[in-house]
Structures are given as structure tokens and as C-alpha cells.
Amino acid sequence: MPPLQQVTSPAVVAHELPGTDLTRWRLKCKEGRQHWHYLETDEECHKWPQTNCDRYWLGLPLDLPDSPPATNPLDAAQKGIDFCKHLQTEDGHFAGEYGGPLFLMPGMCIAHYVTQTPIPDPWRQEMIRYLVNVADAEQGGWGLHIEGHSTVFGTACNYVALRILGLSPDHPTMVKARANLHRMGGAVAAPSWGKFWLSVMNVYSYEGMNPVPPELWLLPESMPFHPSRYWVHTRMVYLPMGYLYGKKYQCPETQLIRELRQELYVQPYEDIYWPAARNDVAEEDSYIEHHKLLDLTYAWMNLYEKHHSKSLREKALKHVYNLILMEEENTGGVNLGPVNKAMDMIILWLEEGPDSKLFKLQVKHYSDYMWVSDRGMMNNGTDGSQLWDTAFFAQAICESGLAEKKENHEIMLRALDFIDDCQIKDHPVHYKEAYRQLRKGAWPFSTRHQGYTVSDCTAEGLKAALCLMSLSYTPNSIPEQRIFDAVNVLLSMQNSDGGFASYEDIRGPKLLEIINPAEVFADIMIEYSYVECSTAVLLSLSYFRKRYPDYRTKEIQNVQKSVVKFIKSKQRADGSWFGSWGICFTYAGMFAIDSLTSVDETYANSKHVRKGCDFLISKQMKDGGWGESYKSCETGEYVHTATSQVVQTSWAVLALMAAKYPDQEPIRRGIKLIMQRQQLNGEWLQENIEGIFNKNCAISYPNYKFSFTIWALGRYARIYGNADIL
Ligand code: LAN
């Protein structure tokens, strides 16, 4: 292991907040990868001018003309498209921030600190600015996500991050955060993921953390609790966590570490009795409580940890490391997501050294996750949402009929280029040993470099490819065989309950949730059949069959039948569907109703569609819009926002229109609201956060306010004609 040198970030003193000159940032995109560059000299800035895309995401004034408000839906849609043209990057995708979660930057900072990897100074300044900007203004500290209340996890870990970045403990944000952290009992009561990161940083003891034994990976794969059966994100977090835990890796002590030990706790660090901390989780953090069986398992594991065999541990670590190497090989250092990325970076540094190719690749691709905004630089929830956003834009513009207009040809051709390039063309290497799902023909959520199949991303990619290639002027650039490959992937992912999960089919029993160690997230141990994933697959298969009626016809018909049954079985008594990835009932309602109409069920002939529509209508607000809070996802009941939201209004009217809802008036009112909210330059302003995961963590999809509004406007004009509304 290389000797530790203190990473010196120039200290930022109290009251002084750094920040860069935002006019010097440029977004460069290639094959979907998004990299923000900071130009140091005027000469560079002159040679590489800032675009409206850069300026939009940085919150700088745009160089775009205003024009009078559109009076009819198609003009409003075209005005929106004209604005969005500026957000399409050189490789054809629609870029966007993907922030929201606040538990990612600490991992990034700790990984850089322990591996003594300097964080580029402009990043460092903007990261400080971001965390200061998103701090809880009332209570101080940080939550699990930007709209959540302060927690010990968010506060302790982001406090550490800011100290690593060089913010002084006397800065008002830090003083306030510390006071709130102490009010919550100090960092002792962090949830398990917090305990882990703080232990790696050496400001917590592994003695205070329940075990994550790497030996689990050596158990027979046939066992129901073998990690290969976990949901891929859980599996890929607990893989490197098991490695670092197994080694009890801690950063060697530095002055900063000594100081943090004093700042994070209410009691002297030396006096903390760590074993008592293992099951101590602050009330503010605890979303789900440990099951009694989990505590029993932990008691047993703690005993094992005291007496474990050294050679077995070595064997387990070797096995786990091999799996980590496969993940590196398969993603080229991008990794599945931001949590395993931070851990893998530390592990590669320990195993391969700072000069190794693998470690350097890890460092290089941190940039894929970092995004600069008006509030500063954030750590995105993935390496972007490129495929996902581009597929929605493409379908929205196609459905409006505006894609055929000459002025829109170029964006559509470029979107097709991107979707073509983004499709995954091969299976992962060592896919069996690495427990991967087959992926040849799939589309990912972000980029093909990340390279993980997602069922609904494949479905949306396929739909977008088919609608783009059916335009009169586009080439059939994606060969038929690759379209079939996508369908093959989808057909291989159906679960026995008829539904579709996210990345893989369901591999483990629901009982595994009993041993969910993450107190802050629910339902993360295994895959589930999700309404959104299942409906997107149904829609894409219906679409596909129209164009290719002879391909695997019988199987596709059977899949359609069983997935329809699944979707119906998930409808609640009040007619709603619960959304797991978007907020919430309006999101799932749109997918569910849209998909049922693709097999010819409508308001007139289907009680499921009828009940779904009636539910949506019952939630329409006085101003004609819909607005739903992320609290719906947390509580499982519909929670209105204070004001209506254009995104949820679009979802609701899209569903009603697909269903052929008999009364045009509620739909017209929704469309009118969308048009009234459009700005003179064609954009819609950011409103509440749109997405969710693991029931409890909100995440931003800022492009939804463009893609779904345009989609709703276009569908309205197609169905009801384009008469003036405003
Ligand atoms: C995502 C983002 C996209 C999302 C959809 C495609 C919208 C969904 O329909 C299927 C699931 C998926 C792919 C999804 C799964 C979980 C992700 C990757 C995220 C919500 C983005 C961030 C989140 C990831 C787990 C964050 C890291 C946190 C951990 C708990 C490991």
C-alpha cells in the first residue's frame, strides 16, 4: 500500500464560499459519456464557445428569442421542441442532470481522500458550493435526498465530505450542521451504510458495524440467500463492501481524521463503546426496522467475526476481488452505479496501486458521474439518463407528427444515431461467473459503456428506434437482427408472475427482505416485477408486432397475455397503480393505462382502464392540473403537492387520452395548464422532483418537463385536432 500523504486541499475559511466562473464550464459528450470541462484561459474560452445547452444547465441566461405564447397545442409543442433542440448534444442525446440523492458525494470524497487522488480544483469549489446550497436551511445538515429532512447519514457523511473538500468547521453551514448532528445524537447512530463509510474514513470503528462477511460469496449458489440472488444494485454494493469490511480497511490516521473524530460526536471518541452502536440507528434515519431474525443473524455473525478462519477469509477476499475485476472489465471503469464505483476505486488502489491502468481508468471515469449546475457540482445517481431521456423525446416528437416537419429532421436523425450507437451489441464477458443477465440487443439506462440491461430501457429504446425508423426520411440504420436481439432480451426477462423486473429476472425469495441491512431503503434485496417495467415491455411488444408480425409470434402473444394479467393484478381497489421509479400513482397510471390500450382495452370496454381513469380524474386539482408529492411513494397513499405540476399533469392527460376518456373537458384543462406554464422562449420551468427509488429516495428527471409536456400536447392535437386553447 502506498504511504499516506496528507491530501492538502487549500482550506476554505469561515464565511468565504468558493465558486468558479460558470461561464468557463463546457459539456463535452461522446457516445453518451458526459464530461464537464473547466477552461482556465480566455483563449480556450474563445476557441470553445459556451453553448445554450451548457448555459441552460448552468442556470445562465440564454441567448434565445422570446416569442408570443402559442395559442394551439401543436404550436406549443413546436415551441418546446425549438427550445429542446439546444439541449441535444453533439452525439445526438439529450443531456441532463441526474441529482437528488445526497449519499453519493461522501463516497466520492472519501475514495479520493484515502487514495490520495486530488479532486480537480474547479470541481472541489463547485462541490462545496453544491453541498452548502442543498443543506437544510431550517435545521442544518443534509437528508437522504435534496427534498428530505436532515438525517444522521446525510449530515455526518456530507460533513466529512465538506471537510475533505476543505471547508472550515467554522463555516456557518458546518456550525449549523454540527449542531443538528449533535442534536440527533452524533454520528454513532448512523445507519449501516453511514457506519461503513465513516469506518473506511477511520472516524468510526468497524466494531460498531454489523458484519458484511465476504465469505457469503463462497456459499453454494443454490442457497436462497447467496448474494448472486440479490437485486443487482444491492449485490454490487455488498460485493466491495464485503471486501473492505473483510480487510477492515481504514484510512491511516491524519490530522483531519483526528479533528473529525472530535467534531462528529457528542462524547469523546475514545470513550465510545462501539459494540453498542451496531444496532443503534437514529429515528430520523430509520425507514425500516431490523427484523428480529436479522438481529439474530448479526449476533451469530459477530461471533463468527471474532473467530473466523484466516485462510477462508483470504479465499473469500480473492473470490470477491475477482468478481470486482469482472465488473471493471465489463464497464471499463464506469461501474454499475456511483456507490460501487467509489468502493471499487479504493479497492483497485489497494490491490493494483496508484499507477495501475485499472485504477487510472477508475479515476478518469469519475467525470462521467459529475454534473455542474447553478447550485454547484453534484454526483449524479448514475452516469446519466441518456438513453432514457432521448427515447422519450424521440417518441414524443414522433407521436405529434411534428417529426415529419423539415425543421425537425435533423434532431430526429441525430437521436436515431445515438439510439443506434447506444444499443448493447454483445453479451458481458464471464457473464455466468459474474452473475450477469444476458444483454446482447438490450438498451441501458445511460450509456452502452455502463452496459447493464434494463427491461424498460430496452423497451423504450426499441420503441424509439422503431418510431424513428418509420419516419419518411430516416434510414433503417439498425439492422433487423438487432431489433430481434432486443426482443429476445425482453422475452428472456419475464418472471413467473407474468411481470418484468428492472435489470434481471427475480432470482431470490421475498423472504430475503428480512435480512435487508440498509435501514434507509425498503425492498432492495431482490428484484420485483414492477408495473412500470412490465407495462413498458408490453407497449414495446405491441409496437413491435405491428411491424414484425411473424417474429416469434406465439411466444410474444403468450407474453402479452400474461403480462396483461400481471398489470391488472397490480391495480389497487381504488383503480390506481403504485409507481416505484417515478412519483407515483400518476406515473404508474400513465404506463399502465397506455399499455392496456396497446392491446385494445379502452375506457369503453375495460373495467381496469375505466377504474384507472376514474382514479386519475378524482385527483385533478382545481386549476386543471395534477400534482403529486414524493411522499406518495413513502407512504403508499396519494399525497398532493401544494401546487399542480406540469410533469404529472402530462402523465395524467396522456393516460386519459390513450384510454379514449369520454369527456374531453378535464383533458383540455390539463393541456391548457401545460400551455399556460410554457415560457416565452418555449421552455417549462423546473418544478418539484419527479423520480424515486427504493421507496424513500427522490431523484431528479429534469427533462421530463420537456419530453412529457411535448408528448401530451402532440397527442392532444392528434386526437382532438389543433384548435386554439389559449
Ligand atoms: C434507476 C434509474 C432508472 C430506473 C428506471 C429505468 C426508471 C426504472 O424503470 C427501472 C430502475 C432504474 C434503472 C433505476 C434503478 C435504481 C437506480 C439505478 C436508479 C433509481 C437511479 C439510481 C438508483 C441507484 C440504486 C442509486 C444508488 C443507490 C443504491 C441504493 C445502490
Image (cartoon, helix red, strand yellow):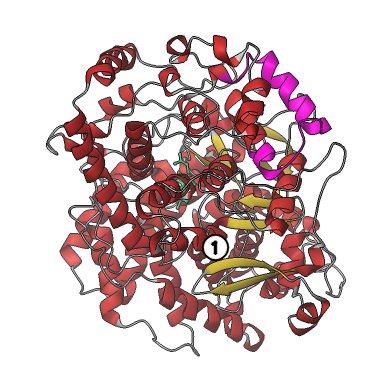
Q: Nearer the viewer, residue 448 or 357?
A: 357
Q: Residue shown at 51%/22% (left/top)?
A: 287
- Quadrant location of residue 427? bottom left
Which region is colored magenta? 161-187
Q: Nearer the viewer, residue 416 or 423?
A: 423
Q: Is residue 478 visible?
A: yes
Question: Does mark 1 have its CB less than 8 Å from ligand 1?
Answer: no
Q: Residue shown at 85%/36% (left/top)?
A: 14
Q: Nearer the viewer, residue 45 or 53?
A: 45
Q: According to the image, label 1 marks what residue?
A: 389
Q: Residue shown at 56%/22% (left/top)?
A: 285
Would you say residue 170 sits in the magenta stretch?
yes
Would you say residue 498 sits in the magenta stretch?
no
Disc 1 marks a residue whose amino acid type is Asp
Q: Main secondary structure of the magenta part?
A: helix
Q: Is residue 355 left or right of residue 626?
A: left
